[in-house]
Image (cartoon, grey):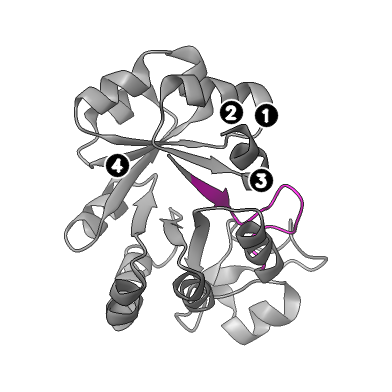
Amino acid sequence: MKIYAHRGSSGENPEMTMTAYLAAISDGADGFECDVRLTKDNQIACIHDGDTSRISRTKVKVSSVTLQVLKQNSPVITLLELIDLAIKNKKDLLIETKHPVPTGGAIEREVCALLDSKAEEIERSGIEIICMSFSWFAVRRFAKVRKSCTVSKYFWQVLLSRTQTVAINIDLVERYPNLVERLQRRGKRVLVWTVNSPEQISLCHEAGIDGFITNFPKRVKISG
């Protein structure tokens, strides 16, 4: 049962900053989770929203500016920086691409190209990297060349998913107590997001999930 730091240890640190991921290491997380988008100059930035208004005092649209401008206006890091941190500290990595975006499937192509360029280092470190998305099309693009994961908050989408790994919303576990077992009987690996409260953590332990995606990795670590 693995613990993935959702956007880093984001419950107590600014999400997807280097500070949050360094805290995740200290908190004993087994891996990191991040969301990625492309900047105007095709650089892969770790950011959830389409603009910076929620994480910065200025509003900058990610796809409309270069990485340099984005970094000047917000505390974002690049996927390359996060991969290097993961390799150095032997932490697994979940990479989620966001959709819809103006560049369509370009983000999956760029992510795969970056992972290809780091393939030898990743293999030597022994870490696992899984690419995932809510988008069925994105998952299909990843599935051709990478470990892929369907992310969903819908019951039937999860049941119909073809990926070996699925990431499901905690609400589904709460509403359908037998869902995790049902999926695992089909040979699927089940990750659950976002598991934060003591009650949610306890429920997921009882359900026997394969991985926690949490803002508080230390809290989950202690519970185990």
In the rendered structure, which amino acid carries the disc numbered 1? Ser
Residue 167: in magenta span: no
Magenta stretch, overall SS: loop
What x and y, as percent, mark residue 211?
44, 40
- Residue under circle 1? 197
CB contact under 8 Å: marks 1 and 3: no
Q: Of residues 154 and 204, which is closer to you in this image? A: 204
Is residue 206 found left or right of 128 in the rendered image? right
Image point (35%, 47%), residue name:
135
SS under mark 4: strand
Q: Quadrant of the C terminus?
A: top right
In the rendered structure, which amino acid carries the disc numbered 3? Lys
- Pick whichever of labels 1 and 4 is earlier in the sequence: 4
Dot 1 crowding, Cα within 10 Å, few <14, some 14–19, many 20+: some
- Pick whichever of labels 1 and 3 is earlier in the sequence: 1
- Residue under circle 2? 201
- Residue under circle 4? 165
